Amino acid sequence: MQLRNVVLLSLLQLTKAHFLLNSPPTIGFSDDEEGDYPCGSFDATDRKTVTDFPIGGIPIALTSTHPEVTWFYRAALLNDTNNWVDLYQSITQVGQGNFCSQNVPGLADWEGQDAVLQIAASAPDGWLFQCSAIKFVSGAATAPGGSCRNATSVKASFSNEKLILNAQTTTISGSSSKPTQTGTSNMAPPASTTSATGSNAGASNRVEKLAIFGSIAGAIGLLFI
């Protein structure tokens, strides 16, 4: 009975979470406030833990508890966190669990600059955000570690969706492609190069989130079959 209680608690915690930024380290995580733009209610200028981000790229490891989510990888300079630029093409994940983009490139124009990495997720319960304190540095891509792999149930593909943010709305445009990939995430970078030109205007946007009662009920039911 004690083991079942431990397993149940773990399942409930995972089900409650929207998404986790596993690597690089997150500035902060609050499940209840993960919908607060731009960093899930945490200060975008927090520099307690800073990760060097080589221009050649780094792996970014995430965990989603949703059956489908679209990831957006963006960055802003520390002294201008109202203007975010895309680092990578958006990716749609189908299936719950770990997902790792092995090589998200840096911005050559921002080499030597303090910056903030933002992961934005378009999920069934709304928009979700987490950030990481970074500094763009010269160098080749950081090799992904052994934990940088997808859950066996996860499929992923590049998406045509674009993140649009302004003072009133948080929306996406375009349509996502069908998932085609399983296993370790070794998706090739998009054909277009990453630069620091262009930006999306930042704004505060509290996203209303729905409770995930169905998933919790399912998890409880499995324990007592």
Image (cartoon, rainbow, N blue to C red):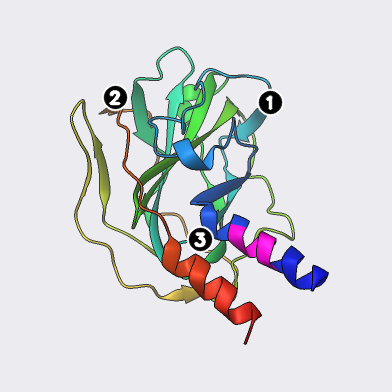
Tag 1 near tag 2, CB within 8 Å: no
Q: Nearer the viewer, mark 1 or mark 2?
A: 2
Front residue of 107/130: it is: 130
Q: CA distance from mark 3 to mark 2?
A: 26 Å
Residue range corresponding to the magenta coloring: 8-12
- Which residue carries the number 1 mark? 49
Dot 3 crowding, Cα within 10 Å, few <14, some 14–19, many 20+: many
User: Is residue 188 at all visible to an observer of this figure?
Assistant: yes
Q: Residue furthest front?
A: 1
Q: Nearer the viewer, mark 3 or mark 2?
A: 3
Q: CA distance from mark 1 to mark 2?
A: 24 Å
Question: Magenta: predominant secondary structure element?
Answer: helix
Tag 3 near tag 2, CB within 8 Å: no
> Hey, which quadrant is residue 79 in on the image?
top left
Q: Which mark is first along the chain, 2 or 3?
A: 3
Q: Hey, what amino acid is under mark 2?
A: Ala
Instruction: Give the structural element (helix, strand or loop) at label 2.
Output: loop
**In this image, 130 relative to 190: left or right?**
right
Tag 1 near tag 3, CB within 8 Å: no
Q: Is residue 20 magenta?
A: no
Per the rendering, the mark at residue 65 is: 3
Q: CA distance from mark 1 to mark 3?
A: 26 Å
- Which residue carries the number 2 mark? 203
Residue found 60% across the figure and 70% down from its top: 151
